[in-house]
Image: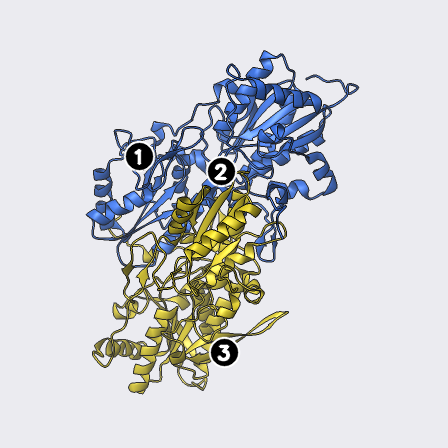
Chain colours: A blue, B yellow
């Protein structure tokens, strides 16, 4: 932007979109802090429920929030899910209908907006791409920047995504605790643990970090990057049951057979963005074992807590999410647009990250899967390279404060419709 | 026992049984510490896999473990599940067959045992009762003492049970985090959260603690102590959806209709002790809403982590579990037998507990449910009295140490069969 300090400062809008993570509010805090310490930008507005808040005129003045409460940013950093709310709104093709774009950029002009930050995953980067293309088309100088967040870790170019490290830490810790829960019985048993991750196996792979000096659980790990063979699976289970009393299996919700059919005991629907809604890979494997091997078996679905358990966040993740937000502001000041903030890993010993940016058109609508070279040949485990990649991301604990026995999070009263409350 | 210091000290055996909790190893640590500082007792042996370890001669010398590693007891206090393993073994009626009893008491004599401590829930107290009756029958002076533990909080006489407070804290924290996860969408939704508790609703009731100044979630709470009416439920959901975007329901796995039939989408089997194995009350309510109300709906099952997530234990619970264990040793020294350690609440402001003991025959094979006066008339919420009862039990956090990003627990290598491991 190369703004001169004498020129009137412009304002910013930030919004959040897609599914929740533990780190997305840390990125929001980073943007707010970035704008507060900026020479180019003045006020930062938050758009409620993603891009919809601009369309519906539901904006909140986040600079005022931070000014009014000195603890606001620190508490925001440790509050899970999305302080500004989310949406699953897909922008129409501007070639078909540019009225929505027209309205958004008229709002930008009205509010004297110099930069728009969208914190989100793959679908949200589609919105960043479309707004960037439209901005170029109308020769707007509003900087459009994406800030990555997704527990799925499936965004292109960036080494990893904010939100992933905390989910990975939650999953590995849960596997460790489930292993302790399982080991208590001398009776043979199989425990199937189903983990989120439709097309990319990063989250399921993170279960490997639960292994330690006394336990090799999870003994089998199945990612959606390879085909799942029920016969080989049963052979593996039978073999492991001769070695261990309690066999633990980590499985992605998205595993499929060689013909691409999902291994699932449940139904399948499609969401706004055309994804299949999966449930039941864990249940399906539970039934498979039950029907073929005479052994106690159960399945556990690691539920939505893998994306919202802020009490067990990775400090590395939260700090990187914050930095991604504040760097986005710096990049906008430097004139960067039509881009997403990226992290480049420059070393593992010691672990080191450099922040950069990449063109949004190289990122949006592409998914980064686990490289096949990081999965063992049998397709039932991951390699040491993948362990080395994952390990730094779950390091460190955050200082969650507790009030009356529960984690103390920032109020999201502004998201909860209460006008008709008694 | 009134032993004189000049008389040779006797030894003790301790074992754990039933389902895991976060606090049962703290009770074990309490027993070990109690014996270490005892004038009457010498060595404490741990029996692996409950009473089975005595039958199979799988005992470990816990006094030596504590002597060898100064951090052993502190780490044991914070390790989830059961360090000694568990069993679901039910002792036969000694009137039918006393050979097992004969063997157990011959082992007691051989090892010079003065006291046997069994840490467990309702089924384990049945074992304590049977051993106590047999001891009286053969005029044995071995003290038989039960130490309560169950996340279900359904043991008679005692104000509450060790293990419950941590599970309650995990459930309330999870509900709070799930609420944050839910509030992000402006689209109307219903979220059903299924919580453990077959016959007693204590754990489900604990979800009420998630309510705070900005959120009344869970908006509905259904316990198994009352009959569940699907029509009233749907009426409640419809009413709440006019007030809130996102309605959250906490439901016990054991809810049933007026005829006593479980509300369940799943199958039902029976375990060793004749209980029905339930699954699917949450799924059943999900389908009920889906079929009758045009709204986004999902169900979440709070999985086994509610009983093994030691990283989120209640400090009050862990401290009380430890004290219950050490008090059991004191009571045994005083000659108490055929009894279970109990906690009596003497005050709520400030919260105060006194440890005592009660006759095992007044406890075993009875279950303590939530009193009906602590459930509202509509059967869809709990009263302030129940909140006041629950609140002190989840207070305080434990100092879990982390290693390489994960909670550091004590090795349970002795429970894991590894002889054929490569």
Crowding around mark 2 (Cα neighbors within 10 Å: few <14, some 14 to 19, many 20+) is: many
Residue A358 seen in render: no
In the picture provided, is B395 more to the left or to the right than A300? right
Nearer the observer: mark 1 or 2; the answer is 1
Q: Which mark is residue B356?
A: 3
Numbered disc 1: secondary structure: loop
Residue A373 seen in render: yes
Picture residue at 28% right of the left edge, 79% below the top: B105
In the picture provided, is B276 more to the left or to the right than B183? left
Cα gap from disc 3 to disc 1, whole angstroms? 56 Å
* Residue B290, image x, y percentages: 41, 44
* Residue B338, image x, y percentages: 38, 81
Q: Quadrant of residue B253?
A: bottom left
Cα gap from disc 3 to disc 2, whole angstroms? 46 Å
Name the residue carrying label 2. Answer: A165
Name the residue carrying label 1. Answer: A262
To which chain does the residue with label 3 belong? B
Which residue is at the front of the view, A273 or B128?
A: A273
Quarter that holds the N terminus of chain B: bottom left
């Amino acid at each position: 932007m190369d703004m001169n300090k004498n020129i009137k400062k412009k304002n910013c809008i930030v919004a959040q979109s897609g599914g929740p993570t533990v780190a997305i509010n840390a990125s929001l805090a980073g943007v707010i802090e970035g704008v507060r310490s900026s020479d180019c930008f003045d006020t930062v507005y938050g758009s409620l429920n993603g891009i919809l808040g601009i369309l519906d005129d539901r904006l909140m003045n986040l600079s005022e929030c931070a000014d009014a409460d000195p603890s606001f940013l620190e508490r925001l950093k440790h509050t899970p899910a999305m302080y500004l709310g989310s949406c699953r709104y897909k922008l129409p093709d501007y070639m078909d209908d540019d009225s929505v774009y027209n309205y958004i950029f008229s709002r930008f002009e009205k509010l004297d907006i110099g930069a728009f930050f969208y914190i989100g995953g793959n679908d949200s980067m589609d919105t960043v791409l479309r707004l960037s293309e439209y901005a170029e088309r109308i020769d707007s100088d509003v900087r459009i920047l994406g800030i990555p967040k997704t527990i799925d870790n499936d965004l292109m170019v960036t080494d990893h995504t904010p939100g992933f490290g905390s989910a990975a830490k939650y999953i590995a810790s849960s596997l460790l605790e489930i292993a302790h829960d399982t080991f208590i019985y001398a009776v043979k048993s199989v425990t199937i643990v189903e983990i989120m991750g439709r097309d990319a196996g990063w989250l399921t792979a993170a279960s490997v970090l639960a292994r330690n000096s006394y336990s090799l659980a999870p003994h089998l790990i199945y990612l959606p990057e390879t085909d799942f063979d029920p016969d080989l699976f049963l052979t593996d289970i039978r073999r492991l049951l001769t070695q261990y009393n309690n066999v633990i299996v980590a499985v992605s919700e998205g595993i499929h057979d060689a013909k691409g059919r999902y291994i699932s005991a449940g139904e399948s629907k499609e969401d706004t963005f055309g994804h299949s809604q999966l449930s039941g890979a864990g249940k399906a494997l539970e039934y498979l074992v039950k029907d073929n091997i005479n052994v106690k078996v159960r399945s556990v679905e690691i539920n939505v807590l893998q994306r919202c358990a802020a009490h067990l966040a990775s400090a590395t993740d939260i700090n990187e999410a914050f930095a991604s937000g504040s760097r986005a502001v710096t990049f906008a000041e430097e004139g960067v647009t039509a881009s997403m903030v990226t992290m480049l890993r420059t070393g593992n010993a010691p672990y080191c990250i450099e922040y950069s940016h990449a063109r949004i058109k190289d990122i949006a609508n592409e998914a980064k899967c686990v490289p096949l070279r990081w999965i063992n040949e049998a397709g039932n485990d991951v390699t040491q390279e993948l362990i080395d990649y994952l390990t730094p991301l779950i390091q460190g604990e955050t200082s969650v404060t507790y009030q009356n026995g529960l984690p103390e999070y920032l109020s999201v009263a502004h998201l909860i419709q209460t006008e008709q409350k008694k």
